[in-house]
Image (cartoon, rainbow, N blue to C red):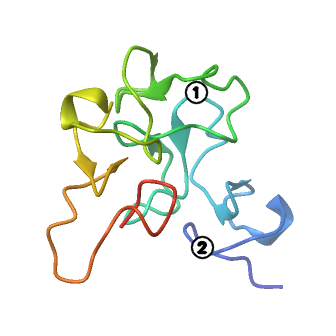
Amino acid sequence: MNKKSNGKTCGGSTECGSGQCVDGVCCNSTCLGTCQSCSVLGSEGQCINLPAGSQDTVATVMCAGAQYCDAAGTCQSGKKANGLKCTGSAECGSNFCVDGVCCNASCTDACYTCDVSGNGSP
């Protein structure tokens, strides 16, 4: 049976050539660190740090409560995670407050909004 390459969707490690199915995709490593993922858009299949403001919902050791990831693989507190309501960019771990929601990007492209997705992604 042909094994899937890194970045392809998977339901278990036996499907992957790397032997690692992490965050629903074949991955180059086990990716067990806090604030790391193999399914970050544009880097699927590579274990990388989550973007600033993200919440790590599948980590072995998750960020607690209102904490967010800082893009360096560490949980931080004091600012809001993506997807939470805000009134200004300084409130957000990502430093983007768009449409009243902490967002992972500035959402300046036409027809993009952060409020509709509910998770801080355009």
Work out which quarter of the rendered image holds the C terminus and state it. bottom left
Q: Quadrant of the N terminus?
A: bottom right
Q: Which residue is mark 2?
A: 5
What kind of element bears circle 2?
A: loop
Residue position marked by numbered label 1 in the rendering: 34
Q: Residues within 10 Å of mark 2 (few under 14, many from 20)?
A: some
Along the line of sight, the residue nearer the viewer: 10 or 28 = 10
Q: Pointer 1: residues within 10 angstroms few (<14), some, or many (20+)?
A: many
Q: Check the image and report above or below for 77 versus 121.
A: above
Q: Look at 58% across and 27% down and name the residue there.
A: 34
Residue 10 against residue 69 in the figure, above or below = below
Q: Is residue 56 above or below residue 68?
A: below
Q: Is residue 69 left or right of residue 89?
A: right
Q: Amino acid at mark 2?
A: Ser
- Figure check: 2 above or below 32: below
Q: Residue at x 50, y 55 (%)?
A: 119
- Which residue appears at 67% of the width and 59% of the height? 18
Q: In terms of depth relative to the viewer, which is nearer, 54 or 36?
A: 54
Q: Position of residue 96 (x, y in %)?
A: 23, 44
